[in-house]
Amino acid sequence: MAAIWSPIMASKAESSPALWNDWHVISQVRAGQKGSSTTRLMDVPLTITWNGSVDSIEVHDDRGNGIRSTCKYGFLWACLGEPAREIVEIPECEDQGRLLVPVGAVGLATSGFRAIENFLDLGHLAFIHSGFLGQEPYTEVRRHKVETTADGVCASEVKIYQPYASPSASGAIDVDFDYYVPRPDVIYLRKTNPVHNDKRDVVALFVQMTSEEHCIAHMLCAYLPEGLEVRGMREFSQIILSQDKTILENQIPKRLPLRETSEISSRADAASVAYRRWLSASGVRYGVIPAQ
Amino acid sequence: MTYQLSEWFAVARSDDAVPRHIVQTQLLGQELALWRDDDGAVNVWENRCPHRGARFSIGYNLGMELRCQYHAWRYATGSGRCSAIPAHPAMKPPATIAAKPYASAEKYGLIWVCLDSDADLAGLPKLPGDVWTGMRSVFVNSPAAALRRELGADTAQVVYFLQPVDEARTIIHCLVAGAPAAAARLTLQRRYNAELTALRDRLEQAS
């Protein structure tokens, strides 16, 4: 039998430096955790060894190579290549005056980029999250700003009528939003706090791409503490995540199509279109159907 | 096995498409959404909203429109043209936005589809007589060619139409001539259900 000469690549993601040389969440961190656990990042099987303190966690791939890892925001982050930049900065997620709660991790049978795009999507709120984050007949997506810079995509001056915007809401309010996508698999938003209308709550989604068509979405809430309890925050977020899961697992194709003609967009999809273009421009070829 | 693009395939029994329901099925790897409008006409569409790719089969059949679950865009029976985008309530959707309908027909108690954009109804299979009774359709993890060999030639009393789901899976649609009364029909349904189930078991165990 002829020998097969092909370069051995641990993962197809190696050809997307914007992903390979960046940090990604691979687990939540629990205080005092011991023992080992396994997970996967971009097709690479990983073993995490927990030694009781956040400073002594070790991560190895399936060939026994040590993998760079560090803790931030209550999560364990790993970089499979050479880190080209720091983990994204979200000041509210380190503000000890807030309730910082990892509200849930949901496995999704789709590309992680579909999950990020769903978080960024305004048009579905009145339907998929009806009674919570939107409500008919308030279905119009009002004009807002969308900007793309080297730091990612930002959608700002977004206003949405929300019947039950967060677990501390006592009635419907018009909520002001700003969305930020600073990394291909990281998104967070700042939104009006229902009690203090001049202050903002933060919700972040860190997506762990286990393969091109599977991911784990880790959600972190950094809320002002008034009127909140951790249990209520978890229940609220898990309802929202489960509503999105149904949609996300029924999108065809699973990998995000970057060619602009493959899916039709309207003005309400400006942020989604900007996100797809930015992924293309960043050279991301994993978890997507490239434009070319 | 290769197929002509112009070929018509049975993809469901007529009574599968009940009012206000959406049937999900697949033909030659292409996912389909079948739905009957309130006037009785059947639509067979690509099972994918052109906006963000959500399966139509998890949406709603509103009677004369189909509503996507994700953003509630609505599409008209027949043409598939988008009739409403709730994110822009004041805007009339551009004519270019449409679901993808395939040519379809109802005959012999079955729903037929042709994936060719130049589909010709003359290509529909012709059976002696118009009245046939559908038996239970059976899903088999086996290629259509293997099933055709096993089923043998059709007769004046019973015919089999094969729906190649993809290269490895097939749905057998079985028709029996005439419209037998309830008791006789039940006897026939039991007989063909047993025969096709036995065939499935034999083929799946052999593979």
Image (cartoon, coloured by chain):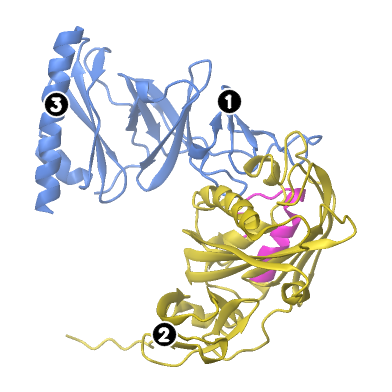
Residue nearer the viewer, A260 or A120:
A120
- Residue B7 counted in the magenta span: no
Can you tell which quarter of the image residue B178 is in? Answer: top left
Q: Does the CB distance between marks 1 and 3 fall below 8 Å?
A: no
Q: Amino acid at mark 3?
A: Tyr
Please indicate whether residue B53 sits to the left or right of residue B156 in the image.
right
Residue B86: where, in percent of width, then height? Answer: 73, 37
What's the chain of the residue with tag 2?
A
Residue nearer the viewer, B124 or A244:
A244
The disc placed on residue B192 is: 3
Please indicate whether residue A58 sits to the left or right of residue B5 in the image.
right
Please indicate whether residue B16 sits to the left or right of residue A209 in the image.
left
Query: Height in image: A160 above or below A35?
Result: above
What's the chain of the residue with tag 3?
B
Instruction: In the picture, one chain is blue; tell me its letter.
Output: B
Q: Amino acid at mark 1?
A: Leu
- Residue highlighted by disc 2: A9
* Alpha carbons under labels 2 and 1: distance apart: 50 Å
Q: Is the residue at mark 1 from the same chain as the one at mark 3?
A: yes
Instruction: In the picture, one chain is yellow; tell me its letter.
Output: A
Q: Which residues are magenta?
A: A257-279
Can you tell which quarter of the image residue A118 is in? Answer: bottom right
In the picture as drawn, the residue positioned furthest to the top comes out as B181
Say what secondary structure mark 3 lies in: helix
Q: Residue at x 50, y 59 (%)?
A: A110
Please indicate whether residue B78 sits to the left or right of residue B141 in the image.
right
- Residue highlighted by disc 1: B62
First in residue order: circle 1 vs circle 3: 1
